[in-house]
Image (cartoon, rainbow, N blue to C red):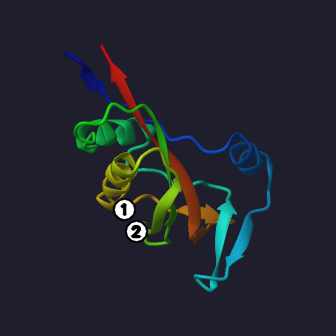
Amino acid sequence: MKQILILSLLILSAFSVSVAQNSDKCESKFDSTLKRSIYIIVDKMPTFPDGKESMVTYIKGNLMYPEKECIEGSVFISFIVEPDGQLSNKKIFKGITKKADKAALDLVNAMPNWIPGSCNNEIVPTQMVIPIRFNLTE
């Protein structure tokens, strides 16, 4: 019988992280759909409450693996961490199956507020992309 092992880590693109850590400038883009600027590189990136390990624990305890699906892979979810910590504009950035995509999006929809990102000590709306990893193991 197979056990389901679900792991996930907060992974930011290597480029974004290295630029954010090595730059004194933040970068934003204007989102014409939302009609406002959203930051993509900030001095201090948003974080899940109590950090990455806490997020992994949250995901392991709350992700509902799709029934009758033998899938492996990562669903990438995009969202904006608002200045008040709420997550908005949540959507599938890259999916694997409809059921896995829905399970990952449901998980993010139920997440608690995050600690927002900041630029020059000002809290700003920041776009994030996180992977939700699905693994099957013996």
- Label 1, residues with CA under 10 Å away: few <14, some 14-19, many ≥20: some
Residue 86's disc is 2
Circle 1 — which element? loop
* Relative image position of residue 9 (x, y in whole percent): 47, 36
In the displayed structure, 92 sits above or below 14; it is: below
Tell me if label 2 and label 1 are in contact, CB under 8 Å: yes
Query: Which residue is found at the position 59% from the left and 71% from the top?
Result: 124
Query: Which residue is found at the position 24% from the left and 21% from the top?
Result: 3
Q: Specify the quadrant of the image occupied by residue 27.
A: bottom right
* Relative image position of residue 116 (x, y in whole percent): 50, 62
Q: Quadrant of the N terminus?
A: top left
- Label 2, residues with CA under 10 Å away: few <14, some 14-19, many ≥20: some
Pointer 2 or 1: first along the chain? 2
Amino acid on which disc 2 is placed: Gln
What residue is pinned by disc 1? 113
Q: Specify the quadrant of the image occupied by residue 12.
A: top right
Query: Which residue is found at the position 47% from the left and 63% from the top?
Result: 91
- Residue farthest along the left direction in this orientation: 1
* Relative image position of residue 45 (x, y in whole percent): 59, 54
Circle 2 — which element? loop
Count of marks, rendered view: 2
Amino acid on which disc 1 is placed: Asn
- Residue farthest along the bottom direction in this orientation: 35
Between residues 95 and 58, which one lies in front from this camera angle? 95
Between residues 42 and 130, which one lies in front from this camera angle? 130
* Relative image position of residue 109 (x, y in whole percent): 33, 61
